[in-house]
Image: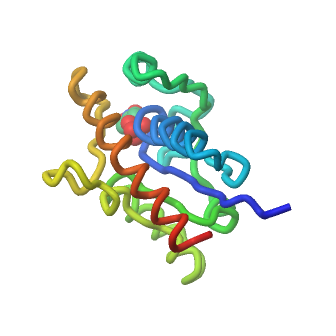
Amino acid sequence: MEKKFRLLFVCLGNICRSPAAEGVMQRIVAERGLEHRFEIDSAGTYGGHAGDLPDRRMRVHARRRGYDLTHRSRRVTGDDLEQFDLIVGMDSSNVYDLRSMAATVEETAKIVPMGRFIRRFPHYDYVPDPYYEGSEGFELVLDLLEDSCEALLDFILAEKL
Ligand code: 4NP
């Protein structure tokens, strides 16, 4: 049996952006018939929402596009940096926090910003926190994730598998 590629999405609270990224990526991977080759999870650098479902607004907006987000929030751990193959931070602050947790150069090398994979939205080089925004903020997150997850999967298939 081939070893699964372990992909972790990380944001601040793990109730908006990263659980949405997990849902979007799961669908793209399934559409390409690759679900058996991936393990996809998400976590947050802040543990204050641990155990919670994604934010209701995020679930509502995701549901309209057919994503059912059922992840329970958890804080990212040092073990995650060791266990996962690629760790994707939604913004520069997430990437900074992840890098400060890395114990080895190998772990540091696993951390990448999601902004690197945004193609269709040239004005964005990160996925902005929607928590204090209105509906447009949540729609923007989903637009950015649907775009960037495609390029992220292409990158993994070309460079990592
Ligand atoms: P997320 O959004 O990082 O995309 O899950 C946030 C969720 C909660 C908070 C901030 C951002 N918070 O401050 O509680």
Q: In which quarter of the image is ligand 1?
A: top left
Q: Which of 87 and 93 is in front in this view?
A: 87
Q: Determine which quarter of the picture holds residue 84.
A: bottom right
> Residue placed at 30% from the left, 37% from the top?
143
Q: Position of residue 153 (x, y in %)?
A: 49, 56
For the C terminus, give its image quadrant.
Answer: bottom right
Q: Which of 160 and 109 is in front in this view?
A: 160
Left or right relative to 50: residue 148: left
Q: Residue furthest right?
A: 1
> Residue placed at 57% from the left, 74% from the top?
107
Q: Which of 150 and 139 is in front in this view?
A: 150
Coloring basis for residues: rainbow
Q: Where is residue 158 in the image (x, y as percent from the top left)?
A: 51, 70
Q: Nearer the viewer, residue 53 or 135?
A: 135
Q: Where is residue 131 in the image (x, y as percent from the top left)?
A: 31, 30
> Residue placed at 62% from the left, 47% from the top?
40
Left or right relative to 94: residue 50: right
For the N terminus, give its image quadrant.
Answer: bottom right
Q: Where is residue 104 in the image (x, y as percent from the top left)?
A: 59, 81
> Residue placed at 37% from the left, 41% from the top?
146
